[in-house]
Image: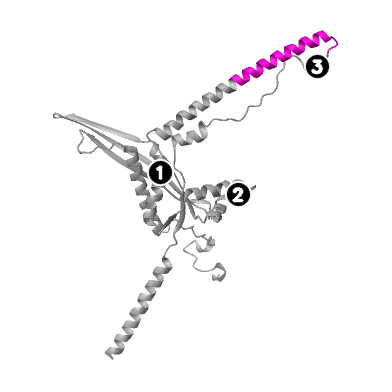
Amino acid sequence: MNKYVTAIAALMLGITVTAADNKEQAEKLTPLTVAVLDFSTTDIKGLNFLAKPDFTPMVRPQEKTAEAGSNYGSDWYMNGVIGAVNAYDNAYVREKSFDWELAQKQFDWARWQQIYEKTVNGEARPVVLAADYFGSYLGAYAGEFNCLDSQVVAAAVQKLVQEPDFPQDFYQKLAKATGLTHLISGTVADMRIKEKSFKGYGVETSTKIYELDVIIKIIDLKTQQNCYGNVYTGVYKEQQPYSAEFVDKNIFQSTLSSALKTAAADFHKQFENKKFEPAKKVEPKPDYLLGDMFMEDPGTLKQ
């Protein structure tokens, strides 16, 4: 009898373990194939949209001092005078127009170059590598995020923008061309600095808190919509007199790296919570099911 009970218990235990394993395998999430686009900043947005030089030739209508009909007078001498006046006037207008256009383009170029120098050599220079940073941090979760090289995406985009129906269903076509499931974009805000000082009892201290916000969004290419986004803040605290042996001289890069590490950890958490899966379509319920008083089809209710 005991052997029979033991055999039944072992069989039931085996069934339970097998069912648990099957459930775990069924709930295992499919890794996302993502590409991290180059991050942007306020200066980069200005570089791209506000101060980019326009080298398109400016078309100006030809201007004349005299009426066109005056060129066909009966006096050949007057016709010659009018032609000379028109020639002088047209040459003057063209010269002034050229000078104005040249000055405008030189101004635009100087402004564009100023923003460019600030972007590549200024404090926010590490943003140029922010996409590589974030892609590497996501690489720690290789079973969840498979990062595709951005150059592959750029090559596919160049082809897709040439299609006659662009940008119709652009994201879905990009997914088909590259195998991507999601795109990740980011924007880095300006550094914020908070300062507080204390003086008293023979002690004088100054504390600075540096904060850097990084805005990250992820787009589901199948639905062509943002499926998640968040703001991550990197913080660095500096106190004078210095209480540490080493002082960080790369505050922007340190706060940026900290924010991106936090973002990658959050993406891992959201992946486990199935946040990146498309939302299921909810069918509207009939009105008679929304109220507590109706528990069955009104057609079956007794009169």
- Asked if residue 247 is positioned above or below residue 153 in the image, the reply reads above
On screen, residue 122 versus residue 86, left or right, reads: left
Q: Of helix, strand and loop, which mostly describes the magenta segment?
A: helix
Total numbered labels: 3
Q: Quadrant of residue 255?
A: top left
Callout 1: 10 Å neighbours few (<14), some, many (20+)?
many
- Asked if residue 90 is positioned above or below residue 120 in the image, the reply reads above
Q: Amino acid at mark 2?
A: Gln
Q: Which residue is mark 1?
A: 130
Start-end of magenta stretch: 73-99
Q: Residue at x 43, y 31 (%)?
A: 117
- Asked if residue 91 is positioned above or below residue 300 in the image, the reply reads above
- For marks 3 and 1, give the one nearer the viewer: 1
Q: Residue at x 36, y 55 (%)?
A: 140
In-front residue for pair 302/263: 263
Q: Amino acid at mark 3?
A: Gly
- Local secondary structure at mark 1: helix
* Visible residue check, residue 215: no
